[in-house]
Image (cartoon, rainbow, N blue to C red):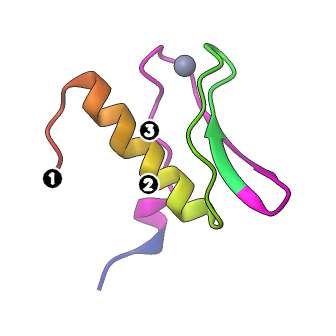
């Protein structure tokens, strides 16, 4: 079994900032207020974070596990 908490950790932004999850009109997205970049909107917080982490890792050049 996997832990839900694991997925809910937002990776640090590539600018070094601490992104936050925000919700608007029932959808969730991750936004970094340091550099202003944001992820796509998703119906759940978990999906938004997952998508952000994936994109972020690609930018940093880390391979996905
Ligand atoms: Zn940033």
Please name the residue that numbered disc 1 is placed on: 65
> Is residue 57 in the magenta section?
no
Which one is earlier in the sequence, the residue at label 2 or at label 1? 2
What residue sits 69% from the left and 21% below the top?
33
Query: How far apart in space, not on screen, are marks 2 and 3 (Cα)?
Result: 9 Å
Q: Position of residue 9 (x, y in %)?
A: 48, 51
Q: Are marks 2 and 1 in contact (CB under 8 Å)?
A: no
Residue bearing the label numbered 3 = 11
Q: Which mark is residue 50?
A: 2
Q: Which is more N-terminal, label 3 or label 1?
A: 3
**Residue at horizontal 55 percent and vertical 54 percent from the top:** 48
- Tell me the SS state at disc 1: loop
Above or below, comparing residue 54 to residue 42 in the picture:
above
Q: Quadrant of ligand 1?
A: top right
Question: Which label lies toward us, 2 or 3?
Answer: 2
Q: Residue furthest bottom?
A: 1
Q: CA distance from mark 2 to mark 1?
A: 13 Å
* Secondary structure state at the residue bearing disc 2: helix
Secondary structure, magenta segment, majority class: loop
Residue 9 higher or lower than 26, as above or below: above
Q: Is residue 58 above or below residue 16?
A: below
Location of residue 30 (image quadrant): top right
Q: Position of residue 35 (x, y in %)?
A: 61, 13
Q: Which residues are magenta?
A: 5-27
Mark 1–mark 3 distance (CA, rounded to whole Å): 14 Å
28 horizontally vs 47: left or right: right
x 39%, y 75%: residue: 3
Question: x, y (%) of residue 63?
Answer: 14, 39
Q: Residue at x 27, y 23 (%)?
A: 60
């Amino acid at each position: 079994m996997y832990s839900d908490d694991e997925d809910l950790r937002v990776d640090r932004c590539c600018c070094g900032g601490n992104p936050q999850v925000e919700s608007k009109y029932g959808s969730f997205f991750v936004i970094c207020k340091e550099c202003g970049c944001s992820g796509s909107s998703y119906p759940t917080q978990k999906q938004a974070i997952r998508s952000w982490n994936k994109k972020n890792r690609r930018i940093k050049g880390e391979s996905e596990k």
